[in-house]
C-alpha cells in the first residue's frame, strides 16, 4: 500500500512537472513571436510615391503601437542605397522600386515584399528640341536617373532593345543623380534628359519639358515603389510586420479616398513649402495611383533575366511576397 502511494505521488509530481514545462515553453514561445524590435529604421526615397508611407510616419502610427521601439526614418537617394542598408542590417524596412529589389533578391539578400505603395507612371523628359526619341540620344548626351538598376534604367533598356536593337546601347549615357538634383540639372541644361518620378516630372513639364517615354507604355501598371523587409526579420517580429502592413493599407485608403486630408499631411511634413492645394493636384493627377498589391514584378524579372541582370527569374509572385500579401493578387 505504501509503495502504491509513493508511486502515485511520483506520477503526480512528474505530471505537474510536465505541465509546468509545457506552460513555460508556450509562454516563452509567445513572448518570442510577440515581442517588438528594440530599434527599427525605415528608409524611403524622395517624392509622392511614398505618400502613404509618409502618412504612417507623420501620424506616428507605429510609434504609438510599439512605444518601447526606437524608430528612425531615413530619406535616401535611391533603391541601391536602401538595399545596401538592408544588407548591412542598418535598415529593417526599405521602400524602393522593383529593380533594386530584384537584384537584391537574386543576390541572396533574403528580403521580400511587404506591401506595394504606388503605381505611378515615370516619365523620361527632355528640354532639348532635337530629342524626339531614344534614337536622337547621341554619345556624350546625359540621361539622368536615380540608379542603374532601377525602374527608369530598365525602361530605357527595354525601349533601347526595341528601337536600337541593343538593350545596353545607351548605358554610357546614363548618369546617376537624385530626383531633386536631376530636376535642377535638366532645367539648367546640365543633363539632356531626366527619367524621374512625381512630382518632379510634373514640375519639369510645367517648366517646358517634354515627355518622350512613359513607363506605363512599356511595362504597364507597375509597382513604382514598395516596402521590403527580410524574411528573417519578419519571422522574428511578425506582429510588427503585420502592423506596418496594416498601417500602409489604412494610409493608402486616406490617399485614395481623402486626398484633401492626405495633401494637408504632406504639406505639414515639408513645413508648408508646398501648399495643400498643390499636393492635392499632384495626388489626383491621372499619372498617379496608390495600391498595396504588387504589380509587374514578374515582367521586370523576366526582362532583367533576359538581358543578364538577374541570374535567376522569379516564376511566381509567391516567391517574392511576405504573408500579409498572400492570396491578395499581384503579378
Image (cartoon, rainbow, N blue to C red):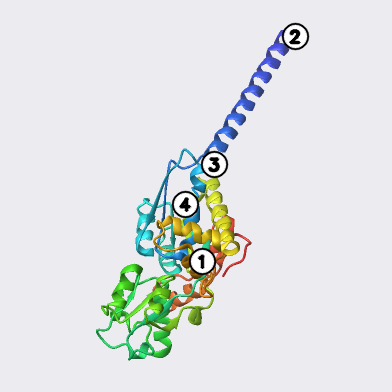
How far apart are the two marked residues, 3 and 1, measured between alpha carbons? Answer: 40 Å
Sequence-first disc among 2 and 4: 2
**Residue corresponding to mark 3:** 33
Q: Which residue is mark 4?
A: 58
- Left or right of residue 159, residue 128 in this image: left
Separation (CA) of disc 3 from disc 4: 27 Å
Using a 10 Å C-alpha cutoff, classify the residue at mark 1 as few (fewer than 14 neighbours), some (14 to 19) or many (20 or more). many
Q: In front: mark 3 or mark 1? A: 1
**Residue, disc 2:** 1
| Numbered disc in front, either 3 or 4 | 4
Identity of the residue drawn at 52% across and 51% down: 244
Q: Determine contact: label 3, label 2, CB under 8 Å.
A: no
Specify which label sits upstream in the sequence, 1 or 4.
4
Element type where label 2 sits in the image? loop
Image depth: mark 2 or mark 4 in front: 4
Q: Earlier in the sequence, mark 2 or mark 1?
A: 2
Q: Residue at x 61, y 30 (%)?
A: 23
Amino acid at each position: 500500500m505504501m509503495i502504491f502511494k509513493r508511486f502515485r505521488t511520483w506520477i503526480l509530481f512528474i505530471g505537474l512537472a510536465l505541465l509546468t514545462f509545457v506552460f513555460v515553453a508556450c509562454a516563452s514561445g509567445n513572448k518570442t513571436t510577440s515581442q517588438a524590435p528594440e530599434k527599427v529604421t525605415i528608409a524611403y526615397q524622395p517624392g509622392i510615391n511614398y505618400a502613404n508611407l509618409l502618412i504612417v510616419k507623420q501620424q506616428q502610427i507605429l510609434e504609438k503601437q510599439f512605444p518601447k521601439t526606437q524608430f528612425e526614418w531615413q530619406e535616401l537617394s535611391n533603391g541601391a542605397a536602401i538595399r545596401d542598408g538592408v544588407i548591412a542590417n542598418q535598415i529593417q524596412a526599405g521602400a524602393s522600386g522593383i529593380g533594386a529589389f530584384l537584384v537584391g533578391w537574386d543576390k541572396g539578400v533574403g528580403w521580400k515584399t511587404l506591401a506595394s505603395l504606388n503605381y505611378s507612371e515615370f516619365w523620361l523628359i527632355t528640354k532639348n528640341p532635337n530629342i524626339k526619341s531614344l534614337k536622337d540620344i547621341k554619345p556624350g548626351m546625359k540621361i539622368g536617373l536615380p540608379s542603374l538598376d532601377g525602374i527608369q534604367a530598365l525602361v530605357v533598356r527595354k525601349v533601347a532593345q526595341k528601337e536600337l536593337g541593343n538593350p545596353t546601347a545607351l548605358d554610357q549615357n546614363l548618369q546617376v543623380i537624385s530626383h531633386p538634383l536631376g530636376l535642377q540639372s535638366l532645367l539648367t541644361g546640365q543633363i539632356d534628359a531626366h527619367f524621374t518620378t512625381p512630382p518632379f516630372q510634373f514640375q519639369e513639364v510645367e517648366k517646358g519639358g517634354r515627355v518622350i517615354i512613359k513607363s506605363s507604355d512599356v511595362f504597364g501598371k507597375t509597382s513604382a515603389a514598395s516596402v521590403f523587409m527580410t524574411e528573417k526579420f519578419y519571422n522574428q517580429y511578425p506582429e510588427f510586420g503585420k502592423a506596418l502592413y496594416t498601417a500602409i493599407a489604412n494610409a493608402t485608403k486616406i490617399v485614395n479616398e481623402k486626398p484633401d486630408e492626405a495633401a494637408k499631411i504632406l504639406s505639414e511634413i515639408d513645413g508648408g513649402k508646398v501648399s495643400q492645394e498643390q499636393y492635392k493636384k499632384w495626388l489626383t493627377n491621372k499619372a498617379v495611383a496608390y495600391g498595396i498589391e504588387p504589380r509587374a514584378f514578374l515582367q521586370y524579372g523576366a526582362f532583367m533575366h533576359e538581358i543578364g541582370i538577374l541570374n535567376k527569374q522569379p516564376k511566381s509572385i509567391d516567391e517574392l511576397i511576405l504573408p500579409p500579401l498572400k492570396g491578395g493578387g499581384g503579378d
